[in-house]
Amino acid sequence: MRINRTNTILYCRNWSDTVAFYQSHFSFAVTYETDWFVEFRLSHDTYLSIANASRATIESVEGQGITLSWQVADVHEAHTQLQQAGLVVSKLQKKWGALLFYLHDPEGHRIELWQPLSA
């Protein structure tokens, strides 16, 4: 089986704040939008959608048990940029053969941004 496209859908109670968070801090392109659902394009075949839990048939897990893990070109730059934007970010740390840090979106989903140590 070949997977041609991935889309992670987060069902959020803090929908407006969560959508604004990804738009303002990550500048993802919007590929589809309604008054309760927004789909962002992260890369060629990778998408992240934010759905308003009050309008969906699936409830929010309020960030529990989810880590969005994204490799970035320059983890130092990403760390500085998000910290300067006023977000709470963890210290840079070496783990899993990578240099990484964590932050959380308004719904509580953990985001891990990383770069291979060999880079």
Image (cartoon, rainbow, N blue to C red):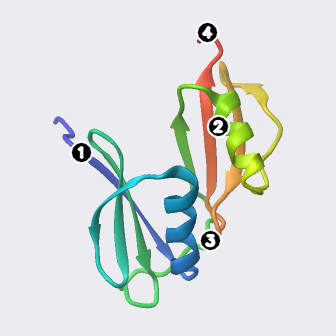
Residue 107: x percent and y percent?
Answer: 62, 71
Residue 70 higher or lower than 104, as above or below:
above
- Per the rendering, the mark at residue 92 is none
Which of the two labelled residues, at mark 4 and mark 1, occupies the earlier sequence position? 1
Query: Does the residue at mark 3 contact the one at mark 2 (Cβ under 8 Å)?
Result: no
Residue placed under numbered mark 1 in the picture: 5
Distance between the alpha carbons at the discs numbered 3 and 1? 25 Å
Secondary structure of the residue carrying tag 3 is loop
Which of the two labelled residues, at mark 3 and mark 1, occupies the earlier sequence position? 1
Seen in the image, is 20 located left or right of residue 58? right
Distance between the alpha carbons at the discs numbered 3 and 2? 21 Å
Q: Nearer the viewer, mark 1 or mark 2?
A: 2
Residue 79, by quadrant, is top right
- Per the rendering, the mark at residue 118 is 4
The residue type indicated by label 1 comes to Arg
The residue type indicated by label 3 comes to Glu
The residue type indicated by label 4 comes to Ser
- Identity of the residue furthest to the bottom in this view: 54
Residue placed under numbered mark 3 in the picture: 107
The residue type indicated by label 2 comes to Ala
Q: Which of 110 and 81 is in front in this view?
A: 81
- Identity of the residue furthest to the top in this view: 118
* Crowd rating for badge 3 (residues with CA inside 10 Å; few <14, some 14–19, many 20+): many
Distance between the alpha carbons at the discs numbered 4 and 1? 28 Å
Residue placed under numbered mark 2 in the picture: 78
Residue 77, by quadrant, is top right
Secondary structure of the residue carrying tag 2 is helix
The residue shown at (79%, 32%) is 92
Distance between the alpha carbons at the discs numbered 3 and 4? 33 Å
Residue 40: x percent and y percent?
Answer: 36, 57
Residue 30: x percent and y percent?
Answer: 33, 60
* Crowd rating for badge 2 (residues with CA inside 10 Å; few <14, some 14–19, many 20+): some
